[in-house]
Image (spheres, helix red, strand yellow):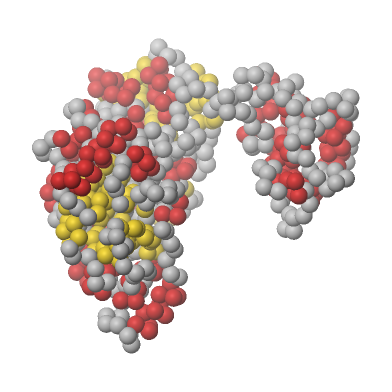
Amino acid sequence: MFKKRFPAILMVLALVFSVFIYPPPILAAVEPRVDGVALTILHTNDVHGAFEKSDAAIGHDVIAGIYDAYKDAAQRPVLLLDAGDAVQGVYFVGQSRGEAAIDIMNAVGYDAMTVGNHEFDYGFPRLRELGAKAAFPFLLKDALSDGADNFAPYVVIERGGERVGVFGVTTPQTAAGSVGGIELADAGKSFGSVAELIDQARAAVAALRLDEKVDVVVCLSHLGVEDIGFGTSYDIRDNVEGIDVIIDGHSHTALADIEQAGGKAPITSTGTAAVAVGVVDFVKGDDGKFTVDAHSIFKADAEAFAPRPEVAAVIANWSETVETAGAEIVASIKEDIPLARSLLRTGESVAGNLVADAMRAASGADVALENGGGVRDTNPSLPAGDLTRKQLITVLPFGNVPQMAAVKGSVLKEALEHGIASYPTPMGGFPQVSGVTFTFNLLAPAGARILEIKVGGEPLDPGKTYTLATNDFTGPLGGDGYGMLREPFASQALPIKETGLATLDEVLIWYLSEHADDVKYETEGRVVAKKIFADLTAEQNAALAPLFDANIINGFEDGSFRPGTMVTRGQLAAMLTRALALPYPNDPAGFPDAAGRWYENAALACGAAGYISNYGDGAFRGGDVITYGELARVIERVTGARPDFGPAESNVSRLDAAKALIGLSPASDSLSQAA
């Protein structure tokens, strides 16, 4: 079962009363929420270098204190595990290429971690070095583990009479999404398919249950729960028996947002950046079998725990090391620049444009392309005013090297097609570009979406050679699926103009210093998505575009508009509500037959505005097809003028409904009626 944590105020009261009842005082904060707890696992995931306490992060000195409190006061065995992506993400750990993260985790006393895809960002040799520095095992149960020099697939931890088996799996996306993963993929090492991940997890469970005779099996899964084609923790849960709990990472999902399945292993996760510590209590029943109670300790609750001084000292030492260099002011900007992940991975963004412009200026290339996932969103924005080296390195923490090569126009088109193939699904490889603009049809199939490309304002010539700047991840390594760039960057590499700039963060600092007046604070239409319906004429598509873009009228799943399909009262209410931005009534009443229907809110909004009335029996009848006479009455109520549509008793098509709405939508004031 999954329950919410006690409110912070109750914890504080419990702590006060515990002074008179239990030693030590912290006991009340960790007292079992249910009887019969035999084992507790504390866990983190996707810390991404957020080891210092901040407005959002708990701080790993406090996490160590939580661990201590559970071990010392709960009177039951306790483990601390991590589900990957710890050693990368902010300047604090990036400047040491992950060593700071391992030092801190050693000081906290982690028992094991799985290897996340970003553990590979500094290259596989560096990952092996970090694994050797760790006082706890790095776990990775996939095809990579078959090599003698690689990581253990699982570990058995015996504590307090309980034998706990822990195995790790990581996303196959690593092979195309991290420097070290690409190195290994090129060397013939596989991270597995979804089916192979399931088989490997089954093998790990069998080894732990049958050979190791463990009491509990824990899967440390760096797969996430968002299905983008590389497998998810749901795949492991739904296809592998014998797992007691799956501690998940990769998709930055909070426990409350995970879909649980009755009778299956529960999945738990803590989001990202150490905003919470996960707690998994194993409750032993009279039959000796375990049930799981999972919850999270958020920062408000964590304030009740005393930090461990020794860990605080390690963090402070690393903080002092990086702060001196990081505090130097190296640039300034006039306005905030948003860094939201949703912007960088789904469309043109100000931050992405900035990085691409910097790379094009430094290289002298015709075109620059930066993968959206390479611009990090650790902070919500770059704030207006002076910027420090630390702030800018945090935006580009990977140490990527700018590269340039000569590529054919056909290859550039292929790269851009790949970058928008999954749109509107977020993708780390979404192209943030400079020197090129392109328009694509999101209703077209992947690989054939682009309608127009212009380089330097001129139409792209597939046979012409252009210079392309990118980073060493997407170029020579073909990261994020840009495999088409590997060959030209291997055979036609060119030196960049500013040869003294070794890394992409240095390029950004240089650009903001030397080209401050060229910085753009708004998007410019470099990447434009359109909805082009094959069953509408070009004139109709153009005229109705504002309605499509505003989601006032949408098409069907097959990409068609079906202009001749008749419109229902429910559809008309929805379109009117979107077109006029009608508010939902504060005191909704009426239309009982609309209750629970997809159009309920729209019906109530239109009813409250007086645009659509009910029938004599009070019903809305949202499924009834409307007539031209009914549509004319509705428009008369909205505009005060009654249009003449022709035969009042005839039914209204989707195309004619769209024509009528063009004049009502603020987005289309300048457009005439559709042809």
Horizontally, residue 536 falls left or right of residue 626, namely left
Quadrant position of residue 638: top right
- Residue at image position (26%, 40%) is 201
Q: Which quadrant of the structure image shows residue 238?
A: top left
On the image, the x and y values in percent for residue 646 come to 88, 24
The structure residue drawn at horizontal position 53% and vertical position 23%, both measured from the top left corner, is: 444
Give the residue displayed 17% in from the left and 63% down from the top: 161
Specify whether 146 is left or right of 372.
Answer: left
Q: Where is residue 563 in the image (x, y as percent from the top left)?
A: 70, 23
- Count numbered badges in the picture: 0
Residue that extends furthest to the front in the rendered view of this protein: 287
Residue 358 sits above or below residue 443 on the image: below
Horizontal relation, residue 197 to residue 596: left or right: left
Residue 456 in percent (x, y) is at: 47, 24
* Residue 395 appearing in the image: no
In the image, residue 3 lies at what x, y percent?
43, 62
Q: Which residue lies furthest to the left in this view?
A: 148
**Relative to residue 350, is residue 106 depicted above or below?**
below
Task: Indicate the quadrant where residue 35 lies.
Answer: bottom left
Reply above or below: 127 against 5.
above
Residue drawn at 75 percent across, 46 percent down = 593
